[in-house]
Image (cartoon, grey):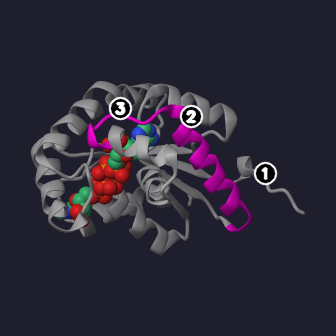
Amino acid sequence: AVTVDIKKIPVVFVIGGPGSGKGTQCEKIVKKYGFTHLSSGDLLRAEVASGSERGQKLTEIMEKGELVPLDTVLSLMKEAMQSKAATSKGFLIDGYPRELEQGVRFEKEVAPAKFVLCFNVSDETMTQRLLGRAITSGRVDDNEETIKKRLKTFHDVTQPVIDHYNSKGKVKMIEAEGSADSIFEMVDKVFEEEGI
Ligand code: B4P
């Protein structure tokens, strides 16, 4: 079998608060640039849906708006990347890293990120979007109480990740209050500037 060197495939981290539009913009990026979209949240929800014992524990954590253990999410991410590496033009790592150590471990054990795409949205807007999604999503974490906790986790634990990459000049900050299409125009510009 041919082994693929993941380090040669561009990696972009996509971060932002809950409901900041990460998943929405990633879909648009995939359409235009053909990257492989890997959402840590989706990988975790798939693990839950599989009915495994590990999945049961994950639901409890996600319901509380907390972060699941680093090794769980990193190993799910690695497995998914390995299985797509042979055909991938690039990876959008969506919703990861959410804590500093996740970024450090990923860049050491998998590959360095080319840049970090970051969506800046007010808590009010994120809450409204998530409450809107709650009507149809059936997600255990799309309710008012959990949304408050998710926002707290974001400000306490994920904001330092953004500050860290910002100090390295790697953050591409997108003001993401507007419509999905107007936000994508800004995202698109970043990808062009980065030569993707
Ligand atoms: P995620 O699945 O990442 O959930 P999310 O933050 O809500 O982002 P998502 O991509 O789904 O939403 P989007 O903003 O696109 O995480 C869920 C949980 O999993 C976490 O709380 C945590 O417990 C766990 N987890 C995930 N990753 C982890 C990690 N790395 N480490 C540890 N734990 C982890 O969209 C939200 C809504 O807004 C949608 O309805 C969308 O249609 C709408 N919307 C988007 N853009 C819009 C726009 N411009 N205007 C109007 N509406 C818009």
**Residue at the spot of label 3:** 158
Which of the two residues, 111 or 166, is positioned nearer the viewer here? 111
Q: Secondary structure at mark 2?
A: helix
Residue bounds of the magenta highlight: 62-87
The earlier-in-sequence mark between 2 and 1 is 1
| Badge 3: residue crowd in 10 Å (few <14, some 14–19, many ≥20) | many
Residue 88, numbered circle: none
Q: Is residue 173 visible?
A: no
Q: Does the segment drawn in magenta span residue 48? A: no
Residue 148, quarter of the rendered image = top left
Q: Is residue 27 above or below residue 64?
A: below
| Badge 1: residue crowd in 10 Å (few <14, some 14–19, many ≥20) | few
**Residue at the spot of label 2:** 71
Kindly report the distance in space between the C-alpha atoms of the residues bearing marks 2 and 1: 22 Å
Residue 109, quarter of the rendered image = top right
| Residue with the most extreme right position | 1
